[in-house]
Image (spheres, grey):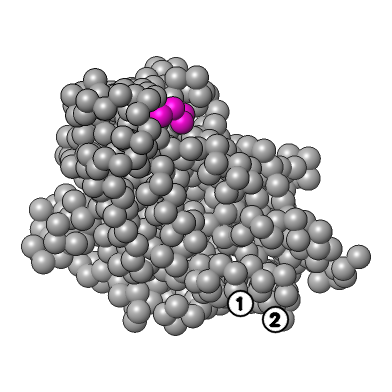
């Protein structure tokens, strides 16, 4: 939930020039020879280990980073291509027999890491398993939690998208939908639809992250996760494409960002997930480190969450206009991020609408007048002393205290929100407890949160995946508890609309509505793209989604620092 824990890796820059975008397809058809060395290790520095090893219940970046190296989906966005086109992956091809009937021919010659063959039976088994954990079969026991990702495969009214899964032949399946669902192929590229071995996986029990094995078809075989220490993988030499270069892959878990960043400078890790902006110049000056920087921002989105159930739109608007965004972007982060006016990043190109002229910016007069017009106070707009000395309402601010920015936001908000009569209460806590709150596991549910800072990144490349999970009243990730009938109508219309031109307009209408009328969050920023790794690595998959993918990475074994 810092989903996609939003570690800062990034978008491509010179891939079209370098030809990297063709490497994956070259390997796929056998045009590129990759010779694995006897022994080679790639070490990734990451801030946290997987919260959920089971793809059907994983919804954070640390979990997805692990799963993506081990398990694969039928469709996959080419992360080595700046445009990230959707590729047939474990699917060889597909055809739409009707708007609601999808026929998929599966790739042959693919094996799971336990030697089990991947075929129609295995694919249907996995979809039925996903269906079960989303409780779309109605068979999930009351004591078993519904998969967090269930809303990705549901219509706006909460009804299931998938209707049935049918085996046509050994390598052909049909998937029937209850109705037209525009983003379905993209949704099927998310890790929740990863194929796991039926011979090594329970169909009715989630994988235990601490003790179970993740058995997929991917380039790496999962070995073990030592909690808060490391995740170990071994190369799968029987991979259906050419094997990866590295015999071993290690995710070195270092929660402290300073420790992690200095490990990169010391050469103790090969790839850094989650960099400190104060060290960017140092990274850039190092001859042994590649510091890749591009202008186009990530699709990820950071924001101040506001409990819409407890905090009405008047207060949400006032809060949105009481934040000094320039201070956060320019003084605190020194230009490392791009101001956001909603969940849809400029990285979505045609779907993005620049709302800087109409969206909320710091304006204490507007913030105060909003409260006055609502009859909340009789204070004069220019009575600064009166506003600062009056407490009209109190709200908790929650975040994890071991994250410097989240911790720093508490005194910042306490000072800024005095200007509109809000007393901010310190709700800082540990990361583990904050995650507990963000997943709605507190007895009070999401009402345990009032103001909280968090980020979101896409599960798949449709812009609706930045809107529906955060704002739909059926989504488990709607931590702000947004429940707006007009927004629900927009979402439903998008899901059923075949015309991309019309879908673009729907997204722009939603963006405008969020920024100028609903104020469900206070919109902070989108990360600018940066990747930091050892200079001897190449074919790195820089991508706008910020997804980490090991498969194409190579090391120049003859490289020496200049």
Residue 449 appears in the rendering: yes
What is the x, y in percent for residue 25? 64, 48
Q: Which residues are magenta?
A: 360-364
Residue 537 appears in the rendering: no
Tell me the element at label 2.
Answer: loop
Residues marked 2 and 1 touching at CB (< 8 Å)? yes
Q: 490 left or right of 532?
A: left
Q: Is residue 499 above or below residue 25?
A: above
Q: 526 left or right of 502?
A: right
Circle 1: is it few (<14), some (14-19), or many (20+) Cα within 10 Å?
some
What is the x, y in percent for residue 294? 69, 42
Q: Which mark is residue 248?
A: 1
What is the x, y in percent for residue 36? 70, 72
361 part of magenta stretch: yes
Which secondary structure class fits the magenta region best? loop
Residue nearest the observer in this picture, 276 or 324? 324
Q: 47 left or right of 535?
A: left
Quadrant of the drawing holding the C terminus? bottom right
Q: Residue at coordinates 44% horizontally, 27% vertically from top-left? A: 363
Circle 2: is it few (<14), some (14-19), or many (20+) Cα within 10 Å?
few
What is the x, y in percent for residue 149? 29, 51
Q: Residue at coordinates 55% horizontally, 37% vertically from top-left? A: 326
Label 2, label 1: how far apart the Cα atoms are: 8 Å
477 part of magenta stretch: no
Q: Residue at coordinates 41% horizontally, 29% vertically from top-left? A: 364
Q: Quadrant of residue 283?
A: bottom right
Q: Residue at coordinates 30% horizontally, 75% vertically from top-left? A: 208
Quadrant of the drawing holding the N terminus? bottom left
Q: Is residue 477 above or below residue 219?
A: above
Residue highlighted by disc 2: 39
Q: Residue furthest right?
A: 562
């Amino acid at each position: 939930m810092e989903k996609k824990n939003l570690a800062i890796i990034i978008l491509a820059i010179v891939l079209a020039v370098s030809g990297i975008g063709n490497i994956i397809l070259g390997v796929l058809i056998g045009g590129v020879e990759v010779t694995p060395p006897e022994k080679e290790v790639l070490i990734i520095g990451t801030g946290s280990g997987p919260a959920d090893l089971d793809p059907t219940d994983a919804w954070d970046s640390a979990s997805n980073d692990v799963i993506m190296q081990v398990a694969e989906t039928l469709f996959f966005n080419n992360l080595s291509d700046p445009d990230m086109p959707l590729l047939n992956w474990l699917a060889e091809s597909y055809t739409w027999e009707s708007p609601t009937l999808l026929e998929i021919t599966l790739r042959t010659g693919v094996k799971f890491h336990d030697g089990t063959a991947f075929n129609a039976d295995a694919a249907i088994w996995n979809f039925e398993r996903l269906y079960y954990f989303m409780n779309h079969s109605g068979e999930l026991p009351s004591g078993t939690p519904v998969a967090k990702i269930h809303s990705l495969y549901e219509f706006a009214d909460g009804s299931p998208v998938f209707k049935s899964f049918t085996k046509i032949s050994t390598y052909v399946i049909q998937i029937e939908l209850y109705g037209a669902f525009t983003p379905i192929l993209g949704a099927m590229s998310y890790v929740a639809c990863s194929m796991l071995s039926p011979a090594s996986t329970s169909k009715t029990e989630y994988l235990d992250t601490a003790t179970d094995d993740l058995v997929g078809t991917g380039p790496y075989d999962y070995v073990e996760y030592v909690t808060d220490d490391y995740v170990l993988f071994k190369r799968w030499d029987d991979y259906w494409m050419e094997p990866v270069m590295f015999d071993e892959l290690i995710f070195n878990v270092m929660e402290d960002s300073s420790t992690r960043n200095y490990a990169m400078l010391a050469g103790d890790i090969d790839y850094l997930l989650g960099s400190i902006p104060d060290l960017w110049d140092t990274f850039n000056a190092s001859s042994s480190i590649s510091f890749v920087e591009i202008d186009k921002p990530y699709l990820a989105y950071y924001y101040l969450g506001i409990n819409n159930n407890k905090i009405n739109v008047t207060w949400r608007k006032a809060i949105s206009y009481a934040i000094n965004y320039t201070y956060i972007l320019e003084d605190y982060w020194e230009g490392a991020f791009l101001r956001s006016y909603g969940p849809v990043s400029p990285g979505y190109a045609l779907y993005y609408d620049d709302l800087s002229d109409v969206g909320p910016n710091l304006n204490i007069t507007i913030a105060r007048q909003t409260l006055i017009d609502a009859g909340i106070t009789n204070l004069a707009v220019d009575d600064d002393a009166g506003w600062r000395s009056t407490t009209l309402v109190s709200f908790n601010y929650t975040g994890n205290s071991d994250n410097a920015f989240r911790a720093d936001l508490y005194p910042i908000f306490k000072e800024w929100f005095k200007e509109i009569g809000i007393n901010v209460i310190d709700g800082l806590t540990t990361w583990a407890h904050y995650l507990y709150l963000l997943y709605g596991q507190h007895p009070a549910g999401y009402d345990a949160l009032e103001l909280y800072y968090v980020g979101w990144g896409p599960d798949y490349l449709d812009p609706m995946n930045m809107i529906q999970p955060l704002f739909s009243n059926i989504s488990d990730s709607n931590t702000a508890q947004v429940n707006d009938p007009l927004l629900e109508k927009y979402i439903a219309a998008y899901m059923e609309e075949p015309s991309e031109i019309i879908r673009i307009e729907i997204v722009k209408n939603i963006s405008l509505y969020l920024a100028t009328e609903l104020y469900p969050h206070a919109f902070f920023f989108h990360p600018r793209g940066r990747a930091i790794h050892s200079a001897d690595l190449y074919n790195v998959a820089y991508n706008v989604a910020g997804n980490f993918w090991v498969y194409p990475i190579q090391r120049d074994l003859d490289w020496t620092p200049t």
